[in-house]
Image (cartoon, grey):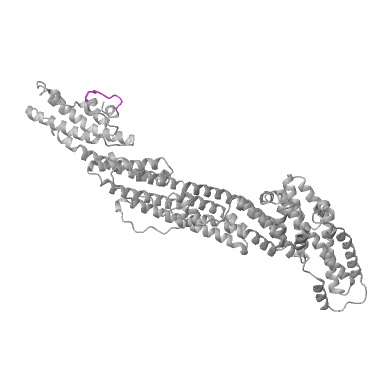
Amino acid sequence: MAILDISKREASSPSTPRRAKKSLFSFTKTNSSLSTFSSHLPPPTPSHTLSQSIMEENIDNAETIIKRWDPKESSFEKFCSLFQEDRKEAKEFIQCVKDLKRAMHFLVMEHSTSNKLVLAHNLMQTAMKRLEKEFYQILSTNKEHLDPESVSKSSQSSHLSQSIAVDSQEDETGSENEIQAVVESISEVERLSVLAMSDLNLIADCMVGSGYAKECVKIYKIIRKSIVDGGLYRLGIESRSSAYINGKNSDALEHQVKHWINAVEVAVKTFFYGERFLCDHVFSASNTIRETCFTDIAKEGGINLFRFPEVIAKSKKSPENIFFLMDLHEKISELLPEIESIFSYESISAVKVQALSTLHKLKASIQTTLSDFESSIQKNSLRTPIPGGGIHPLTNSVLDYVCSLANYSGVLSDIICDSAPAAQSPFPESYFDSPSANETPTSAVSARLAWIILVLLCKLDSKAKLYNDIALSYLFLANNLQFVIEKVRTSVLKCLLGDDWISKLERKVKLYATNYENVAWNKVFLCLPESLDPSVSPDIIKEHFRKFNTAFDESYQKQKSWVVPDGKLRDEIKVSIARKLVPAYRDFYDYYMIVLSGEKNLEVLVRFSPDNIGNYLSDLFHETVPLGSLLSASTLPNSCVWQCLS
């Protein structure tokens, strides 16, 4: 807690009280431990050996440089960094500590009663206090150069790799020169990052090797954890509850998901990657220490990072949320190799477990949402027939949704392949003209999307029964199936469902269109005689004309409010009717008009000429046009029906 208190005071005031500083840089090692260890050793030999003289000389040499940099001689506010002032002497300081350690070990083993042993122990305490201050100073004053982003960039630089390799060589003078050569060839940010990391590694190795790992690790963890936690906070990574998520509307939720997707990319590839690299480098001498440090620094933030998508997955389900879920699933799957590499330590595997658990829950939520969407199609309760047999809103919404799903075919292939097989279908066997799911992951996606469309088509069958006019029900089915075809043909669905699937649906459209023609126009065709007989009396001929006038007028008046939104299908239907009706009526008209040529009020008896019939048919399935305007028209040159018949 002492270090935390210091950190808070540093943030609020320019200086740090000595008492807080003292609690941060405090040691627990005492002379008693040395005395206890010495009491178990055999008595020393009386002779003053050459080795003892060399070791005592090392202690004297160490005393000179260690006392020169005694932390008691400089206040915390006016701290003068050894590593910033003179890197060469800093190297000598580290070397003298190593020599001091060897001398202490020798004296403890061979001459435990030597007066130099107490001096050496005190010097070691002083040196460790100095190195602890240096370690803290480098970490706290180089935050900009040791921030995760800078470290992450530097870790990918070949220059840094060279400097790290050089730094591990035994020749201290040579390595220093080579490091200097490397840092001169890189950017200023990389240069400062390389030097700071190199210095931290030297100090950590020295302190850990001297038995002062606890003090070194304590400072490192507190400073670095505050940097990582602060960085995650600035990225907007916060703990969110299900109640908070459920209270957000779709737009707000979409914004938060997009923000998290951008943030997790930075958090994993920059923050945690950079921190893992820094930790591994600083404590390269000890696998246990670097694992412990990284775990304490990153575990809490890592787990919290991957809890947000889990909360999204557990929140209330709605069809539109499936796209957020798939975005989250795709991003975590993409980052999974980095997650497994960065959080590979057993002690921090909880982060990896959290990410995998979140991935599993997202997958389950997506599968549930798909099933719920299918159920919502089947349960659609709208019982009002669509005017004119037009496109049902359900058809439009389902196809828009399925087209959007098709854009996520890569994500869906991973999810659908792991889902349980569909239950036995209640639909007729004749509907099963869908792609097979037995070949590839993409085939599984194709089969699932085709299945959703199949559910829609079956629902449209029941919607068609709401019409009182059978002909209109067939036109309704033809319109909606044609809409499905065009949506599939002009989207990614075409690649997933294939041309064969489209062709099969086109045949169904033609069947429905033919059924419509037969039902809607059969009465009109029956008004015309099967054959032209010259012996037929004028009264019978007049009766044929009257019946035709009535039947055609009724059919036209009823169908002029019907619609065919698709231009191609509209033209095909009208041309098909015209090619059957107009020639038959023309033959009847031309043959018997000669017989009736002398009749009075002939224009009342024969209301439609063959040309008028074509014009009336051309007007069908568009906006309503007054009957009188068509009666006065002789031709419609731009009519597709007229062009096909002329």
Q: Is residue 272 left or right of residue 83?
A: left
Q: Nearer the viewer, residue 222 or 638?
A: 222
Q: Quadrant of residue 537?
A: top left
Residue 151, placed above or below residue 558? below
Q: Is residue 490 left or right of residue 38?
A: left
* Residue found farthest to the top: 598
Q: Is residue 220 left or right of residue 409?
A: right
Is 30 inside the magenta-drawn segment? no
Q: Quadrant of the N terminus?
A: bottom right
Q: Is residue 536 visible?
A: no
Q: Quadrant of the C terminus?
A: top left
Image coords of residue 148 (percent x, y): 66, 52
Residue 475, placed above or below residue 536? below
- State which region is magenta: 631-639
Q: Quadrant of residue 167?
A: bottom right
- State the count of labels: 0
Q: Overall secondary structure of the magenta stretch? A: loop
Image coords of residue 421 (percent x, y): 40, 58
Image coords of residue 576 (percent x, y): 26, 34
Q: Is residue 304 visible?
A: yes
Is 633 inside the magenta-drawn segment? yes
Q: Quadrant of residue 488?
A: top left
Q: Is residue 613 left or right of residue 129?
A: left
Q: Nearer the viewer, residue 635 or 14?
A: 14
Image coords of residue 538 (percent x, y): 7, 27
